[in-house]
Image (cartoon, rainbow, N blue to C red):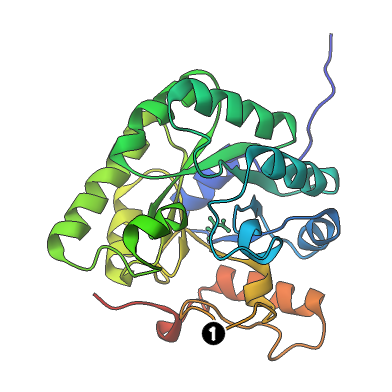
């Protein structure tokens, strides 16, 4: 008996091979079907349905109000027109407090079309990561600046600056990989730490403000189109500044990520 096949060309095996071959991975966020279709046409390899939708779609000042139902709704919208890209969806704040809850939340996102779920946190999430992976839920971990912890951190600040913090983050990255995570987002950390973590892992790292030597890069879509209100973070480049269409800006992003041109030193943090 043959089964209907999901013929999307970008699989986790392909992404692991790209990391091994040092081929850069171009990632962007999307929250709706129109942008998902466009990102596919532009060659974006991974789409993240980020809980940043709390900021850029819903107008909240943090991601903490976003619910699992809202994440599942936006994941469905993106999945409908996603023909090529690997699709990651964020587990939102307080939806993975223990392994059982994490499994239920992940199942909602995977039923909506996610290929992988992303969760924020290090060693304190190891049990959750292991539980999910043992039950066939692919997991992307997220270290560095954790937007869901912004109220605890007292703001959006660069992480891993001291030697102790950097060592601790490296240990956490290894613990996530050992627990079965197959990808790792690194947010707002010094470039040297991003490089050190990337070189020491078998799984791809996706940087956002983590320097040029991660396996791939991600930006929040409205940020890289220069349409988010307020002053953008240092790691954001406005790709619309030099392009007259959204499609051209996204294609330029993919090209610059893949060639290593983006991010430059002006988008990165020193130790
Ligand atoms: O929610 C999001 O868009 C993210 C990125 C900042 C990596 O997690």
Among the 4 quarters of the image, the one containing residue 40: bottom right
Q: Quadrant of the C terminus?
A: bottom left
130 displayed left or right of 40: left
What residue is at 82 percent from the left and 63 percent from the top?
Answer: 38
The number of numbered discs placed on residues in the rendered structure image is 1
**Quick one: label 1, few (<14), some, or many (20+) residues within 10 Å?**
few
Identify the residue at image location x=73%, y=55%. Answer: 31
Q: Position of residue 91 (x, y in %)?
A: 56, 41
Q: Is residue 157 left or right of residue 181?
A: left
Q: From where the camera sits, is residue 9 visible?
A: no
Point 78% across, 79% down: residue = 248
Ligand 1 within 8 angstroms of badge 1 C-beta? no
Q: Position of residue 270 (x, y in %)?
A: 28, 78
Q: Nearer the viewer, residue 81 or 149?
A: 149
Query: Whereabouts is ligand 1, in terms of quadrant?
Result: bottom right
Query: Where is residue 119 drawn, in percent x and y?
Result: 48, 42
Say which element carries label 1: loop
Image height check: is 222 above or below 53?
A: below
Q: Quadrant of the N terminus?
A: top right
Farthest-out residue, bottom:
242
Which residue is drawn at the image coordinates 58% and 51% (left, top)?
65
Viewer can see residue 72: yes
User: Of all residues shown, which one is farthest toward the top?
Assistant: 1
Q: Which residue is mark 1?
A: 231
Outermost residue toward the left? 164
Is residue 257 positioned above or below 226 on the image? above
Going by the image, does 237 lie left or right of 73? Answer: left
- Could you tell whether 110 is left or right of 271 in the image? right
């Amino acid at each position: 008996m043959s089964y209907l096949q999901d013929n999307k060309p970008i699989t986790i095996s392909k992404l692991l091979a790209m990391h091994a071959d040092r081929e850069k991975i171009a990632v962007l966020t999307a929250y709706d079907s129109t942008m998902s279709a466009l990102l596919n046409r532009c060659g974006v390899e991974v789409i993240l349905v980020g809980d940043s939708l709390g900021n850029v779609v819903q107008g909240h000042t943090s991601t903490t109000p976003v619910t699992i139902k809202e994440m599942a709704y936006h994941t469905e919208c993106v999945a409908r027109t996603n023909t090529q890209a690997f699709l990651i969806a964020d587990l939102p704040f307080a939806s993975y407090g223990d392994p059982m809850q994490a499994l239920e939340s992940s199942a909602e996102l995977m039923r909506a079309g996610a290929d992988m779920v992303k969760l924020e946190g290090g060693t304190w999430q190891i049990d959750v990561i292991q539980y999910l992976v043992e039950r066939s839920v692919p997991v992307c971990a997220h270290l560095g600046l954790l937007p869901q912890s912004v109220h605890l951190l007292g703001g959006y600040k660069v992480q891993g600056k001291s030697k102790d913090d950097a060592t601790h983050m490296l240990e956490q990255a290894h613990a996530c990989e050992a627990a079965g995570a197959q990808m790792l987002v690194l947010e707002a950390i010094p470039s040297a730490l991003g490089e050190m973590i990337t070189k020491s892992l078998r799984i791809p790292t996706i940087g956002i403000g983590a320097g040029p030597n991660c396996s791939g890069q991600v930006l929040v879509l409205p940020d890289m189109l220069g349409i988010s209100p307020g002053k953008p973070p240092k790691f954001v480049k406005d790709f619309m500044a030099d392009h007259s269409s959204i499609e051209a800006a996204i294609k330029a992003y993919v090209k610059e990520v893949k060639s290593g041109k983006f991010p430059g030193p002006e988008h990165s943090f020193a130790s």
